[in-house]
Amino acid sequence: MSQPNQTSDSGIQSVQRAAAILRSFTRTDSELGVTTLSEQLCLHKSTVSRLLATLEQEGFVEKNPDTGKYHLGLGLVTLAGIVLEHIDLRQVAQPHLTTLVDQTQETVNLVVLSGAECMNIEGADSPRPVQYVGRIGRRTPLHCTAAGKVLLAHLNPEARQPILSGPLARFTEKTIIDGSLLEQHLAGICQRGYAIAHEEHQEGVSAVAAPIYDHRGKVTAAVTVSGPTYRLEPDQIETCVEPVLATARNISTQVGYNDA
């Protein structure tokens, strides 16, 4: 009666060891030999060789014929692609948005590009009695909102130009309606990594936003903190910048972005 359990335990151990081998490969140690892996994992060389042979058959590692060492195989790319393509951005972002609300006490939204506008697809409300209401599904202009400017700044020139060259609607006295001036403003956003909007779309409302990158390194969303301007004056909004940037980085990492 004990033999099935022993076989099962042995199988689990083999899987754990194979996983340990795969995790041993890093950006700095992208190619490893049997001896090195044996020493690092405290496994017998014959065990490492057997596991590597199996992993090679499955396409998870490949052997360099010139060095005799191994590197990660394309089979992992296929599996990673399946995982990354099916990540639910809203689900991933939601707990991070909640944390950001706790840190800033202001309304937080996850915003994506939607045609020539941007749209809130997830959010968390400020606990304060006076708050910015960023309901899910709300669409706002690109050129005068913090999240919109982040998304606009990271569009390729061909996609951005029709917006910059077209008429830009004025919503407040602070709305930038000159395409050339806006283009300079967007360049600054790319350089510093975040955007601020002080009453450019709505009087009495200010916001700060940062980009979220996907596994391809493409900006696909923005996270934004919005609130009454009297609580987010220039000096005050600066305290929100680092939490917003950190939140955007954390979400980006979780959806597969690697800036190393």
Image (cartoon, rainbow, N blue to C red):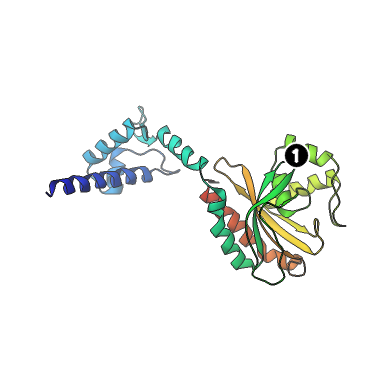
Left or right: where 22 falls relative to 179: left
Q: Residue 220: x and y, percent?
A: 63, 44
The amino acid marked with disc number 1 is Arg
| Residue plotted at (71% across, 52% down) | 138
Query: In the rendered image of this protein, does residue 223 appear above or below residue 54?
Result: below
Q: Residue 259: x and y, percent?
A: 55, 46
Query: In the rendered image of this protein, does residue 162 appear above or below residue 139?
Result: above
Q: Residue 157: x and y, percent?
A: 73, 37
The one of 39 and 51 positioned closer to us in this rendering: 51
Left or right: where 96 falls relative to 170: left
Helix, strand or loop for disc 1: helix
The one of 90 and 50 positioned closer to us in this rendering: 90
Most extreme residue toward the right is: 173
Most extreme residue toward the bottom is: 129
The one of 247 and 113 positioned closer to us in this rendering: 113
Whether residue 112 appears in this view of the structure is: yes
Whether residue 189 appears in this view of the structure is: no
Q: Which residue is the site of mark 1? A: 160
- State which quadrant residue 127 falls in: bottom right
| Residue plotted at (75% across, 53% down) | 145
| Residue plotted at (70% across, 41% down) | 155
